[in-house]
Amino acid sequence: MNGMMMKLFFRFCLALALLAKIATVQAEVMYQCVDEDGRKTFSNVKLKDKDIKCTAMDLGPVMSVPPAPAPRPAARSGSPDGFPKVGENTQRERDNDRRRILENELEAERGNLEQARKDLAEQESIRTGNEKNYQRVLDRLEPYKNKAALHERNIEAIEREMAKLR
């Protein structure tokens, strides 16, 4: 065999081996289908085309999928020995600072959302002469709607973060 034929033969054998491996794990029956031009395809579904002849292949015993590994034991929740500890008052101050920052961000986002909704309402009330096609109106309003939606998502995220605080 020349080099080209050898490569094609090797690829065919590799594909067939991979297909057989997959078939043993996923399917009980594998079909070899040959079309009218003599091209072979392999499938776990028998093709119903009248020009394609499919025959079932003997794949041997079906391998079972190995069971999932057992869950690992939970890691220690405490800090390792010698790890620097933060005092209770220091942690409380940090938590209060975090809460204050989140409250300020929430207030700012609510203001931004209110402004975005006003801008959207203002744009919805405007009709320009070149927007005879309603899609142009929707295209013009889309950035305003996206901006309002962004501020709504930010508010939700900040509220979720505040709910996690102690």
Image (spheres, helix red, strand yellow):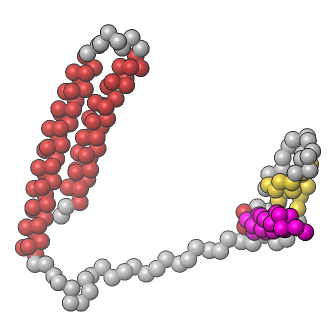
The vertical placement of 96 against 35, above or below, is: below
Asked if one can make out residue 102 in the rendered structure from this viewpoint, the answer is: yes
Q: In which quarter of the image is the N terminus?
A: bottom right
Q: How many marks?
A: 0
Give the residue at x 21% y 27%: 119
Lateral position of residue 98 relative to residue 34, left or right: left
Residue 162 position within the rendered picture, expressed as x and y whole percent measured from the top left: 20, 55
Q: Quadrant of the C terminus?
A: bottom left
Residue 45 position within the rendered picture, expressed as x and y whole percent measured from the top left: 80, 51
Q: Is residue 8 magenta?
A: yes
Pick whichever, 24 or 5, lies toward us.
5
Q: Does the magenta stretch include residue 162?
A: no
Give the residue at x 9% y 62%: 96
Asked if one can make out residue 9 in the rendered structure from this viewpoint, the answer is: no
Lateral position of residue 151 relative to residue 135, left or right: left
Which residue appears farthest toward the front when viewing the image? 2
Residue 20 position within the rendered picture, expressed as x and y whole percent measured from the top left: 79, 66
Lateral position of residue 41 relative to residue 50, left or right: left
Which residue appears farthest toward the bottom when viewing the image? 81
Give the residue at x 16% y 82%: 85
Q: Specify start and end residues of the magenta stretch as a single range.
A: 1-24
The vertical placement of 92 against 79, above or below, is: above
Pick whichever, 120 or 46, lies toward us.
120
Q: Is the magenta stretch mostly helix, strand or loop?
A: helix
Residue 86 position within the rendered picture, expressed as x and y whole percent measured from the top left: 13, 78
Give the residue at x 34% y 29%: 142
Q: In which quarter of the image is residue 124?
A: top left
